[in-house]
Image (cartoon, helix red, strand yellow):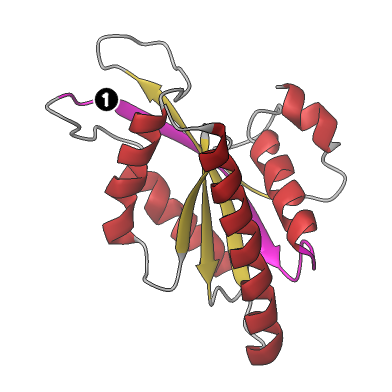
Amino acid sequence: MPLVADDQMDQNFLQLRITWAISHAQKTGDGFALMLIRPGYRSPAYARKGVVVHPGLLHQIIDYMLPWVRRIDSVVPVDRQCIALLAEEVRGSGDALSLARRLHALLDGPISMAGVYPVIDSDMGIVLYPLHGSTTQDLIDHARLALAQTRQPGGTDMELYRRGSGKLNDAEEE
């Protein structure tokens, strides 16, 4: 199990990476997307859906994703149960949703891990810079809200942030 300091280092790296992406986007006029991915784990032997709680499995999922992620993008574990993907040079919601669909198809299926084939069922919350926030904290908070939208009535497994979709405290309680 990783140390609490590891979580803090990942969080700091994510914040620095978003800050750099904002600066780069302001210079180039490009946008970017921040996706929070909550992988759910279920064994093929069980029909119940669970949550990834083992950090080793979360890191295996990240390792599985890396060949499919561009070199300019960043993948960071967050809160021991989520994965943050910062995708640069995303030019709007169409690009972001296309990328999310490809990742969703990659993750939502049997993945070979040490001879076991768990089924990963992921939810994704997506925010776009500058549409959904102009600061690092706004983008992280709105990504968490978008991820919480996936669990609300009428929510799908991929949600773009919608203003007025709830408060962060309500989203964290779920």
119 falls in the magenta region: yes
Q: Residue 135: x and y, percent? A: 79, 65
Viewer-nearest residue: 93 or 7: 7
x and y, in percent, of residue 27 in the image: 68, 90
Q: Nearer the viewer, residue 18 or 161?
A: 18
Give the amino acid type for the residue marked by disc 1 in the picture: Pro
106 w.r.t. 40: above or below:
below
* Residue 51 in view (yes/no): yes
Q: Residue at x 15, y 29 (%)?
A: 114
For residue 59: magenta? no
- Which quadrant is the N terminus positioned in? top left
Pick out the residue farthest to the bottom: 28
Residue 31 in the image: state x and y as whole percent: 63, 76
- Which of 47/58 is in front? 58
Residue 98 percent location from the top left of the image? 47, 61
Q: Is residue 126 above or below residue 158?
A: below
Give the farthest residue toward the left: 115
Residue 13 falls in which quadrant of the image?
A: bottom right
Q: Residue at x 75, y 22 (%)?
A: 173
Q: In this figure, which residue is indicated by the disc labeled 1? A: 118
Left/right of residue 109 with respect to residue 18 in the rendered view:
left
- Categorize mark 1 by other alpha carbons within 10 Å: few (<14), some (14-19), many (20+): some
State the quadrant of the C terminus: top right
Q: SS at mark 1?
A: loop
Q: Is 147 placed above or below 92 here? A: above
Q: Which residues are magenta?
A: 116-135
